[in-house]
């Protein structure tokens, strides 16, 4: 797990404290402040963001600069419900390919730490999901570049017109 | 004679329809907050209120699930439920709970009634923590929401399965006498303002009954 991301998984017995990791450190059940920080981060991304990818139970949601990825573990809880694991973080600080790789590996580490298992298919799905984010960011940059070029061209034309004798 | 019977039946049906219509007016376009510990049934209830169906598969709720404003029909009832959020039942989500609570016209707190009846100490401690927080939030509000306590999973209590549904009132009264339940009701505002409903959501039919019992408790 890296200190860049936060992780969250609900206990399978539905009564023990959830497993929550903030900035690479496991939070204690009584550390309400740190645990709330992770829950609020996830909540804000979901509320303000867009679901970019969904498949086989994996979900990737992003807002302007943060992501939440949710992957189901093989284990189910005592009520027979699917038990997902979450990773949340910022995608501005590294390339998307690097983030996809880190997230995929660190989720396996986190799952193992809490005695849970992720199906091997999710590694590839994680990369697929972040590929969608990569395309979206590329399109956004292209649009921004196009807008900038057109704006400069118009500005130069306006200046040229004004400077006519 | 037959025509008198038919006329009487029509009048009764009209009375029931009018009561439902009043309930529709009371609940139309209302913001609902559904709170409760993990596994209490929040997702199940929210899905039913917003779609009229129950989940085909169940998943623990970690990341909140957004719902959109939906209209659905329950027998003669025609409801409009505003967009809400299905949030985690862990204490880490208390900030999200408060945000939902503060905006809500109707607050529903759900819990496993079967486990309280058994005297589960972990659940009692958890509910106590939840209700102390909720009590503070209620005190801080100028406009008090309508507050419902819904005890679920009664089908797992052997006594519930045995009773004739006409005796459900006695079952609820006995439940109220549990010390923890008295505390919960007091934290939520007292017996005058808090409505307690017990039941099961193991099937869609039982979910409909529970939802109807909830709405029927509203003072019109």
Image (cartoon, coloured by chain):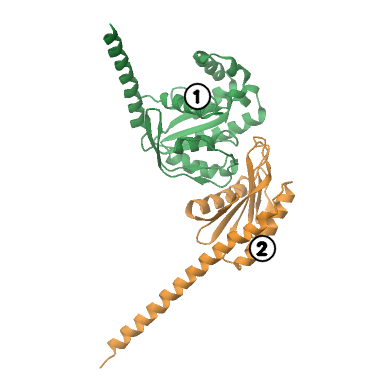
Chain colours: A orange, B green
What is the quadrant of the C terminus of chain B in the image?
top left
* Chain letter for mark 2: A
The numbered disc on residue A101 is 2
From where the camera sits, is residue A1 visible?
no
As drawn, A88 above or below A147: above
- Residue that appears at 65% across and 22% down: B118
Secondary element at tag 2: helix
The residue to which callout 1 is attached is B197
From where the camera sits, is residue B32 visible?
yes
Residue B25: quarter of image: top left
Residue furthest front in the image: B2
**Does residue A121 appear to the left or right of B34 in the view shown?**
right
What is the quadrant of the N terminus of chain B in the image?
top left
B220 or A33, nearer to the observer: B220
Residue furthest left in the image: A165
Q: Quick one: label 1, few (<14), some, or many (20+) residues within 10 Å?
A: many
As drawn, A50 above or below B150: below
**Does residue B125 appear to the left or right of B189 in the view shown?**
right
- Residue B135 horizontal/vertical position (percent): 50, 33
- Residue B219 horizontal/vertical position (percent): 38, 24
- Residue that appears at 55% across and 34% down: B41
């Amino acid at each position: 797990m890296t200190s860049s991301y936060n992780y969250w998984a609900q206990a399978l017995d539905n009564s023990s404290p959830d497993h929550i990791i903030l900035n690479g450190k496991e939070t204690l059940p009584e550390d309400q402040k740190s645990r709330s920080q992770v829950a609020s981060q996830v909540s804000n991304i979901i509320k303000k963001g867009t679901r970019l990818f969904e498949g086989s139970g994996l979900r990737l949601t992003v807002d302007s600069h943060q992501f939440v990825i949710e992957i189901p573990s093989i284990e189910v809880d005592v009520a027979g419900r699917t038990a997902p694991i979450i990773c949340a973080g910022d995608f501005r600080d590294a390339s998307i390919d690097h983030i996809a790789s880190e997230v995929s590996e660190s989720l396996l580490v986190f799952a193992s730490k809490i005695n849970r298992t992720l199906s091997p298919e999710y590694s590839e799905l994680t990369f697929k999901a972040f590929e969608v984010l990569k395309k979206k960011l590329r399109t956004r940059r292209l649009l921004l570049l196009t807008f900038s070029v057109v704006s400069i061209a118009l500005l130069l034309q306006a200046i040229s017109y004004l400077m006519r004798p | 004679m037959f025509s008198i019977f038919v006329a009487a039946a029509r009048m009764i049906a009209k009375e029931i329809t009018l009561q439902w219509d009043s309930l529709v007016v009371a609940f139309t376009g209302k913001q609902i907050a559904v709170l409760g510990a993990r596994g209490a049934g929040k997702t199940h209830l929210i899905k039913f209120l917003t779609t009229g169906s129950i989940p085909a598969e169940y998943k623990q709720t970690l990341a909140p699930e957004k719902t959109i404003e939906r209209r659905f029909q329950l027998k003669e009832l025609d409801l409009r439920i505003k967009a809400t959020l299905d949030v985690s039942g862990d204490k880490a989500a208390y900030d999200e709970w408060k945000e939902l609570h503060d905006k809500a016209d109707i607050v529903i707190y759900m819990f496993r009634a079967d486990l309280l009846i058994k005297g589960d100490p972990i659940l009692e401690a958890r509910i106590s923590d939840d209700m102390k927080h909720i009590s503070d939030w209620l005190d801080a509000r100028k406009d008090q929401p309508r507050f419902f306590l819904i005890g679920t999973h009664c089908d797992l209590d052997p006594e519930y399965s045995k009773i004739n549904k006409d005796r459900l009132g006695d079952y609820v009264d006995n439940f109220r006498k549990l010390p923890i339940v008295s505390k919960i009701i007091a934290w939520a505002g007292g017996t005058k303002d808090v409505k307690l409903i017990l039941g099961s959501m193991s099937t869609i039919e039982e979910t409909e009954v529970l939802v109807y019992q909830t709405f029927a408790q509203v003072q019109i």
